[in-house]
Amino acid sequence: MTTTHPEDAAHRAADGTAPQPYAPAPWPDGWYVREPPPYAAAPHHPWPHHPHPYDQQAHTPDPAPDGWFHEQPPYAPAPHHPWPTGSEPHTSGAPLAPEPLPETSAAPEPTAPDAEASASPRPAARRASRRRAGSRRRRAPGRRRKPPSKGASRAASAVLITSGLAMVLSVVHQVWWTNVQARAEAHEALSRLEQTWTDEARDPRTADETGAFEPGEGFAILRIPALGLASPIAEGTGTEQVLDRGLVGHYTGTGMPSDPTGNVVLAAHRNTHGEPFREIDRLAPGDRIVVETATAAYTYEVAGRIPETPPTDVSVLRPIPGGSPFTTSGRYITLTTCTPEYSTRGRLIVFGRLVEERPRSRS
């Protein structure tokens, strides 16, 4: 293939000669003598703020249509937008002042709007502070209404506490104070009876042998050495006249110690009011029971007992007591009291037989 160089075509046109085919002389290494013209440079479309990397000194950037420049100008300070009145301007990089912790011991005092705004520069923080302050004000003592049911429950609690206290005081009075009073009266009656027997010389055939005593009148002394008991015996078994005064009562109509035959039946409290018969369940066969009058001392020996019998069992009052080991007439003694303890459900019975009679020595 034969090519025509553009310059050769221009010479031919000038001198009118026929064009000669262009055949550049090759270099020894096979390259052409003249190098081809260089490629035209591609149009330059610079990015904003970035000059062309191949012509940074010669190239002068033109302003782009959108107003950007190839070289970034220095930043201008941001416009100032002041905060609302009463608030502090925002300082870049300065930490916010910590909010004070809420006090739970007392309700906080209301603060002025300016002071509250200055303590919390942000609106959200101010709203949160108002909410916390409002909740503390709602929890302040004396401002919350009490439900009606709470007052009723308090009144009921007061009634229950008062009732319980009254019951406790009643039990203390019944179990403890009655014993104190009754023992004091029994001790006084015992001393008075012994003094009377010492001061007055009485005829052996007097009222203590005929049984003519007034209800509540003391006429003998009951002694049980095994129990350490010494208590006056009064006529009758009335509660107020005899038993509640800590005395041992004699069943009217039953035998007297001086009778040739018969059954001397005695009764007393097992609990409260002096409780003279508190421990008669401890008596065993062979233990002694002594009854002293103005003129004699009668000694009985325990022979048996009934652990519990109904209160309606009056057979124990007979001259030969029912349920006893005795089968013939004799001189017997019967002690009765309530059982079980602190109950009137039944009666505990102890039987004794006369084993000795002797004159009472006056000392």
Image (cartoon, grey):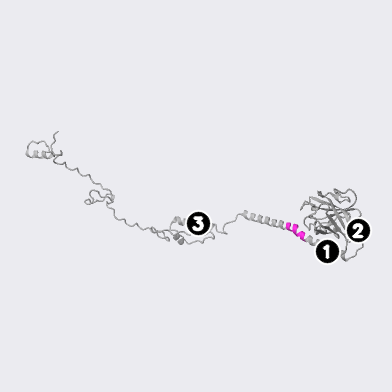
Q: Quadrant of residue 360?
A: bottom right
Other-residue count near label 2 (Cα within 10 Å), few / some / many at <14 / 14–19 / ≥20: some
At x 68% / y 55%, what residue is drawn?
Answer: 160
Residue 356 visible in the shown view: yes
Q: Amino acid at mark 1?
A: Ser
Answer with left or right where residue 172 lies relative to residue 134: right
Q: Main secondary structure of the magenta part?
A: helix
Which circle marks residue 209 in the picture? 2
Residue 132 — which label?
3
Q: Which mark is residue 232?
A: none
Point out the tag, 3 or 1, that comes first from the N-terminus. Answer: 3
Amino acid under disc 3: Arg
Question: CA gap, disc 2 to disc 3?
Answer: 97 Å
- Going from the N terminus, do you reach mark 2 or mark 3 first? 3
Residue drawn where x is 77% and y is 60% of the image: 180
For the residues labelled 3 and 1, the Cα–Cα distance comes to 82 Å
Instruction: Name the front one of labels 2 and 3.
Output: 2
What's the magenta region? 170-180
The stretch drawn in magenta includes residue 173: yes
**Separation of marks 2 and 1 at Cα, in angstroms:** 22 Å
Q: Secondary structure at mark 2?
A: helix
Asked if one can make out residue 212 in the rendered structure from this viewpoint, the answer is: no
**Which of the two residues, 18 or 57, is positioned nearer the viewer here?**
57
The reply to whether callout 2 and callout 1 are in contact (CB within 8 Å) is no
- Is 217 inside the magenta-drawn segment? no
8 lies above or below 122: above
Q: Nearer the viewer, residue 158 or 307?
A: 307
Give percent across and percent down for residue 90. 40, 58
Q: Residue at label 1?
A: 191
